[in-house]
Amino acid sequence: MPRSLLLIPMLFAAACSSPGSNAQQPAGTAGTPTPLPVPSGTPAPLPADVPFTATRVAEFDSPFALAFLPDGAALVTEKGGQLQLWEVNQKVQAVTGVPKVATVNQGGLLDVAPAPDFASSDMIYFTYSEPRANGSALALARAKLTRGKAMAPRLDNVEVLFRSGADGDGGQFGAVIAFAPDSKSLFLSSGERQRFTPAQDPNQAIGKILHLTLDGKPASDNPDAGKVGATSVQVIDPPADTEAAKTAKGRPFAFDGPNPAPAAIWSSGHRNPYGLAFDASGNLWEHEMGPQGGDELNLIVKGRNYGWPNVSFGENYNNKPIPKPKAGDGYELPKLHWVPSISPSGLIYYSGSEFPQWKGSLLMGAMSGQALLRIALDGTNARKADQWNLDMRIRDVAQGPDGSLWLLQDGAKGDGGWLMRVSPKK
């Protein structure tokens, strides 16, 4: 999910073979930014051994994503369909003009990211589960954020750029946006909607990492650029002996026009990708939720297949075993995995200075794991470095334009949902 305006230049050379940039953190101006005012708030009750403090500054209702704007304001999506604008003075205002969302099965208003040229265009990108005649589908949209001292913020000129197609039932939309380092294209994580085998279907854009132009068209350097897919697909075709198989196996879906899925796919075989971030060398990192165990951190490489649902370190919810990944099985191995599950969410490449010992690491949240994790990077290798128990579900992690670190707690208003500023413990 978009996290901040990145403070260091990014390289795009690696993206042609393995994408590169922090799309959640579009490339910004190098140098030392002006620190933002430290917001007031109440301390979050963290365990004593955690080496930082967290200040609660605003509460939201089932927030999903957090994205900072260049002036230090932040956009927060709420799954129920509301986009909120948090100002540096800590005022929170609802942004009007958001399209209607489908809020069932983990859906709703999902990711949000300022456009790479936001400072001059005021454009934002966002994802949501769109209500459709036969269920719902992941949609990527773009709009102008209009705001001012004397007006309530609103979205103007809302335009749907891409739909995943294969409308139907199921959760696990993925929906995370990441802009390429050259700011000329974007990557979008698309979950497999709890449908299993479509993640391996090249005619479906679900269970994939997609590479699109800023106008939502398939990027020209994708593995199957220019290819048009089948005009109809099986919306749900799960393995036997699953709940989905008992209720919805074989439902068809016909595209209204040409099927762009094959031309848009960068990588396949993904389950529920909730984290997407580029490091300073242009490597694209992704994490996704496994079933019972088997959460993964992957290095995303052009054209590779990451195995779901054919292999996993987890087990199906009906306890039916899944073959474990192994070298030579034709699938890309994860760099790290977690058993039991931690339910990863939110992912940034940290480039701030408040925690110099973390600089150059990946930071990610955990919901069922109720933690903040640090992943140390060594080129294209990754190592589990720290896991701090916070006793709260972490939905998102973000870096402000001044390098500050922020967390978004998962929960309903009145029962969590806090935006928190993280600071070193004194």
Image: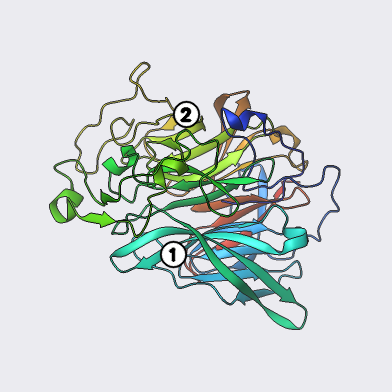
For marks 2 and 1, the one nearer the N-term is: 1
Q: Is residue 313 left or right of residue 75?
A: left
- The crowding category of the residue bearing disc 1, from other C-alpha atoms within 10 Å (few below 14, some 14 to 19, many at least 20), is many
Q: Position of residue 284 (x, y in %)?
A: 57, 35
Residue at the extreme bottom of the image, as rendered: 150
Q: Quadrant of residue 66?
A: bottom right
Image marks 2 and 1: residues in contact by CB distance under 8 Å: no
Residue at 58% of width from left, 24% of height from top?
Answer: 380
The amino acid marked with disc number 1 is Gly
Q: Give the CA separation, mark 2 to mark 1.
A: 29 Å
The amino acid marked with disc number 2 is Leu
Q: Which disc is residue 108 wearing? A: 1
Name the residue nearer the viewer: 271 or 211: 211
**Which residue corresponds to mark 2?**
336
Q: Is residue 32 left or right of residue 359?
A: right
Asked if residue 221 is positioned above or below residue 86 in the image, the reply reads above
Q: Is residue 299 left or right of residue 325?
A: right
The answer to whether one can see residue 391 in this image is no
The answer to whether one can see residue 357 in this image is yes
Name the residue nearer the viewer: 222 or 286: 222
Q: The residue tagged with tag 1: helix, strand or loop?
A: loop
- The crowding category of the residue bearing disc 2, from other C-alpha atoms within 10 Å (few below 14, some 14 to 19, many at least 20), is some
Q: The residue tagged with tag 2: helix, strand or loop?
A: strand
Q: Position of residue 378 (x, y in %)?
A: 63, 23
Residue at 47% of width from left, 33% of height from top?
Answer: 223
Residue at 20% of width from left, 51% of height from top?
Answer: 244
Residue at 60% of width from left, 76% of height from top?
Answer: 94
Q: Position of residue 325 (x, y in %)?
A: 34, 24
Nearer the viewer's eye, disc 2 or disc 1?
1
Q: Which disc is residue 422 wearing? A: none
Asked if residue 33 is positioned above or below residue 282 in the image, the reply reads below
Asked if residue 20 is positioned above or below residue 5 in the image, the reply reads above
